[in-house]
Image: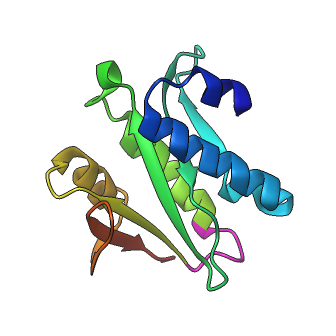
Amino acid sequence: MEAFIAAETDPELKKAYSEMLDGCLRHPDQRQWYAMWMIELQDGTHVGDLCFKGLDTDGATEIGYGISEDRQGQGYATEAVGAVVDWALRQPAVTRVEAETAPDNKASRRVLEKCGFRPSGVVGEEGSRFVRKPA
């Protein structure tokens, strides 16, 4: 993660990745809830990444994700978010997965909807919040 953070040129992403690394270091027994998960094609091509933003004591975790601009619109976010959220909801400590997206980010909203998320009625720092609970 340190090498990835050092190479990152976007200040916002560098800050987010640094916060994730800090979470991993502070909670090594729960690092999967802070680690950066790479989204790669079968040939190893990196197309994006995602992460959880910790695990609350009530079992809530928030997911964040991004796809390289040249790879957007090809279903990679939907496939990756769907798989990781399905995995998360099978973990005994998880009660729900949440996400936020800016009101004008229709593509991200569509990814969340396709992955079974529903609006929670709450607006966070980045925009509307969505939630998905176990079936």
Expressed as whole percent of the image width and height from the top left, the position of residue 95 reads: 58, 80
The structure residue drawn at horizontal position 52% and vertical position 59%, both measured from the top left corner, is 85
Towards the viewer: 9 or 105: 9
For residue 127: magenta?
no
Residue 80 sits above or below residue 118 on the image: above
Expressed as whole percent of the image width and height from the top left, the position of residue 80 reads: 48, 42
Is residue 118 shown left or right of residue 135? left
Question: Residue reaching furthest bottom?
Answer: 58
Magenta region, main secondary structure: loop
Is residue 58 shown left or right of residue 22? left
Quadrant in the rendering for residue 70: top left
Quadrant in the rendering for residue 1: top right
Expressed as whole percent of the image width and height from the top left, the position of residue 45 reads: 53, 16
The structure residue drawn at horizontal position 43% and vertical position 29%, both measured from the top left corner, is 10
- Count the marks: 0
Is residue 91 shown left or right of residue 38? right
Q: How is the image coloured?
A: rainbow
Towards the viewer: 88 or 63: 63
Quadrant in the rendering for residue 129: bottom left
User: Which stretch appears magenta?
Assistant: 89-95
For residue 90: magenta?
yes
Residue 43 sits above or below residue 22 on the image: above
Residue 93 sits above or below residue 34 on the image: below
The structure residue drawn at horizontal position 62% and vertical position 42%, both measured from the top left corner, is 36
Towards the viewer: 8 or 95: 8
Is residue 111 shown left or right of residue 84? left
Question: Residue reaching furthest right?
Answer: 29
